[in-house]
Amino acid sequence: MTSVGDYMLLAPAAGRRIDLGMGRPTIKVGAALSDQVGMVEGEVPPGGGFQIPHWHENLDEVFYVLEGEIEFLLDGYWRRAVAGSTVFVPAGTAHAFRNTSGRPARQLVVGSVEVAELIAELGEHPRERWEQIHKRHRSHYVKRPARLEPRGAR
């Protein structure tokens, strides 16, 4: 990591690695660097992802698929996003993501710094506490099941 003046240059492997057991996000920009922007690079192995449908009261998120393909739960349907795809999820929108491709995938997640802090806090606690952590960050699990059939991207 190089810091000169007010900017930061992080090496490709730099950042705070979090093990969630279903993927390995690395916080590239979080509260240690910014009070406004959060950016997380996520490795999503086959079968991995954050597959719990949830929504955020006041957090917009942008997902950019760097490598492979990831399915996103949007509008009640799983939609496939290949490398180079961008998925914008505004606050209040239920979503989840998963990798069903059989090959590793990578993505960037960009949002407010609270997105990065939520992910970091999840990594510090067992899954049984994750719903409570989401609530503390004004995020909520969706209690109804999602439709399973895939549908083409909009």
Image (cartoon, rainbow, N blue to C red):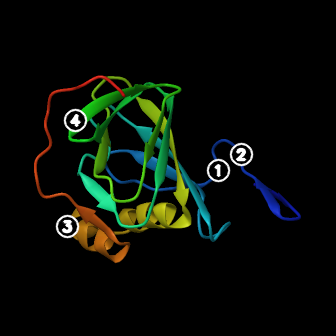
Left or right of residue 4, residue 102 in this image: left
Residue 14: which numbered mark, if any? 1
Of the residues shown, which amino acid type is indicated by label 2? Ala
Residue 130 figure quarter: bottom left
1 and 2 marks in contact (CB < 8 Å): yes
1 and 4 marks in contact (CB < 8 Å): no
Of the residues shown, which amino acid type is indicated by label 1? Ala
Task: Find the distance from the CA under tag 1 to the CA under tag 2.
Answer: 5 Å
List x then y, in percent, for residue 139.
32, 66
Task: Find the distance from the CA under tag 3 to the CA under tag 2.
Answer: 34 Å
Of the residues shown, which amino acid type is indicated by label 4? Tyr
Q: Residue furthest front?
A: 154
Quarter containing the N terminus: bottom right
Residue 128: which numbered mark, if any? 3
Q: Earlier in the sequence, mark 2 or mark 4?
A: 2
Which residue has dot 2 on it?
Answer: 11
Task: Find the distance from the CA under tag 1 to the CA under tag 4.
Answer: 34 Å
Which residue has dot 4 on it?
Answer: 77
Q: Earlier in the sequence, mark 1 or mark 3?
A: 1
Of the residues shown, which amino acid type is indicated by label 3? Glu
82 or 14: nearer the viewer: 82
Left or right of residue 94, residue 38 in this image: right
75 or 149: nearer the viewer: 75
Q: Which one is closest to the eye, mark 1 or mark 4?
A: 4
The local crowd at label 1, few if under 14, some if 14 to 19, many if 20 or more residues have their Cα within 10 Å, is few
List x then y, in percent, for residue 5.
89, 64
Q: Residue at position x 81%, y 59% from top?
A: 7
Residue 73 figure quarter: top left
Q: Residue furthest bottom?
A: 136
Task: Find the distance from the CA under tag 1 to the CA under tag 3.
Answer: 29 Å
> What secondary structure is marked by label 4?
strand
The local crowd at label 4, few if under 14, some if 14 to 19, many if 20 or more residues have their Cα within 10 Å, is some
